[in-house]
């Protein structure tokens, strides 16, 4: 079973509140499943970068563990097209037209390091938060770093934006897999820094990952949540730097072990 089928099966089996929040470029569903009830409300999103699709399975673990307080919406696979390109390659793409375009963008049939969506836009630099000002930002579509024509030019980021504006979460967590670190800062006012940092420290205690201040990157979901809503928002980079992308089963055990209680512990630490 591929990662999309696994998420689909998880979604169908979930007996809690759930929603399809939008569709990917290639028409795949973006699934969201709720755990817990009431306030505070969080959103956790996973696998925005294709090659980091292993984190979708961490969402299953978070579903099983639940939260201590309030609720969390889990969006296990924000970039299903990119994930399947990485996992399966061009055979995951139905239309010949899309296949040849993607081959042109990647310049190789090996998509195992692909991060972007099916239009070659890197979703985590497509949000309206200092958009296009990142050190690695490019305008050329490809496997990574392309910011898109404008903020929210992509169906996946549009869907996440609309859902987040609808839910109005108290905090958000984004899961990636580049080294073991937690990011919490994005030019928020000094007044809210202690609040945000103390929650980041709760995540740090839970996972064992250190906090990281700056990343020289902009336009991410976390960045946009902080800027748009003034809420605490976190990026957790799970998985050791030494793991090769895409991460396999051994990495999943390690990631689940360290991150299994992250949302649970974060909800406990939240002071509303
Ligand atoms: Zn990432």
Image (cartoon, rainbow, N blue to C red):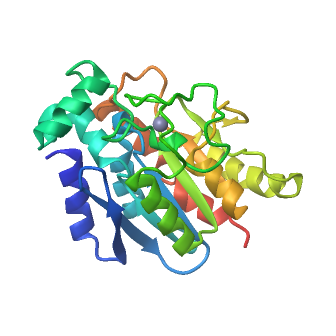
Return the residue nearer the eye: 31 or 135: 135
Where 271 sits versus 143, above or below?
below
> What number of labels is visible?
0
In percent of the image, x 73 and y 69: which residue is there? 271
In the rendered image, residue 252, in percent from the top left (x then y), is placed at 35, 38
Return the residue nearer the eye: 137 or 248: 137
Return the residue nearer the eye: 12 or 60: 12
Res. 217 image quadrant:
top right
In the rendered image, residue 155, in percent from the top left (x then y), is placed at 38, 55
- Which quadrant: the C terminus? bottom right
In the rendered image, residue 189, in percent from the top left (x then y), is placed at 84, 53
Can residue 65 be seen in the rendering of this structure? Answer: no
Return the residue found at the far right. Answer: 191
Res. 251 image quadrant:
top left
The answer to whether residue 272 is left or right of residue 10 is right
The answer to whether residue 99 is left or right of residue 222 is left
Can residue 75 be seen in the rendering of this structure? Answer: yes
Return the residue nearer the eye: 139 or 197: 139
In percent of the image, x 38 and y 36: which residue is there? 116
Where 91 sits versus 40, above or below?
above
Return the residue found at the far bottom. Answer: 38
In the rendered image, residue 174, in percent from the top left (x then y), is placed at 52, 49
Where 77 sits versus 92, above or below?
below
In percent of the image, x 79 and y 58: which residue is there? 195
């Amino acid at each position: 079973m591929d990662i999309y089928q696994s998420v689909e099966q998880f979604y169908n089996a979930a007996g809690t509140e759930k929603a399809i929040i939008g569709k990917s470029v290639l028409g795949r569903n973006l699934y969201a499943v709720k755990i817990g009830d009431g306030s505070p409300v969080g959103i956790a999103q996973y696998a925005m970068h294709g090659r980091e699709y292993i984190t979708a399975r961490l969402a299953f673990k978070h579903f099983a563990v639940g939260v201590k307080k309030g609720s969390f919406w889990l969006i296990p696979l924000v970039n299903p097209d990119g994930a399947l390109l990485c996992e399966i390659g061009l055979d995951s793409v139905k239309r010949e037209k899309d296949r040849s375009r993607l081959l042109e963008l990647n310049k190789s049939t090996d998509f195992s390091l692909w991060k972007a969506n099916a239009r070659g836009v890197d979703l985590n630099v497509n949000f309206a938060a200092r958009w296009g000002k990142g050190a690695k930002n490019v305008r050329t579509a490809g496997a990574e770093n392309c910011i898109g024509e404008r903020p929210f030019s992509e169906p996946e980021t549009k869907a996440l934006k609309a859902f987040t504006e609808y839910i109005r979460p108290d905090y958000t967590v984004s899961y990636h897999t580049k080294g073991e670190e937690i990011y919490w800062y994005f030019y928020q006012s000094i007044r809210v820094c202690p609040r945000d940092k103390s929650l980041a420290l709760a995540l740090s205690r839970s996972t064992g990952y250190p906090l990281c201040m700056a990343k020289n990157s902009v336009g991410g979901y976390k960045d946009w949540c902080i800027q748009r809503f003034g809420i605490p928002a976190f990026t957790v980079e799970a998985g050791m730097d030494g793991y090769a992308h895409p991460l396999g089963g051994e990495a999943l055990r390690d990631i689940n072990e360290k991150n299994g209680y992250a949302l649970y512990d974060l909800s406990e630490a939240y002071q509303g």
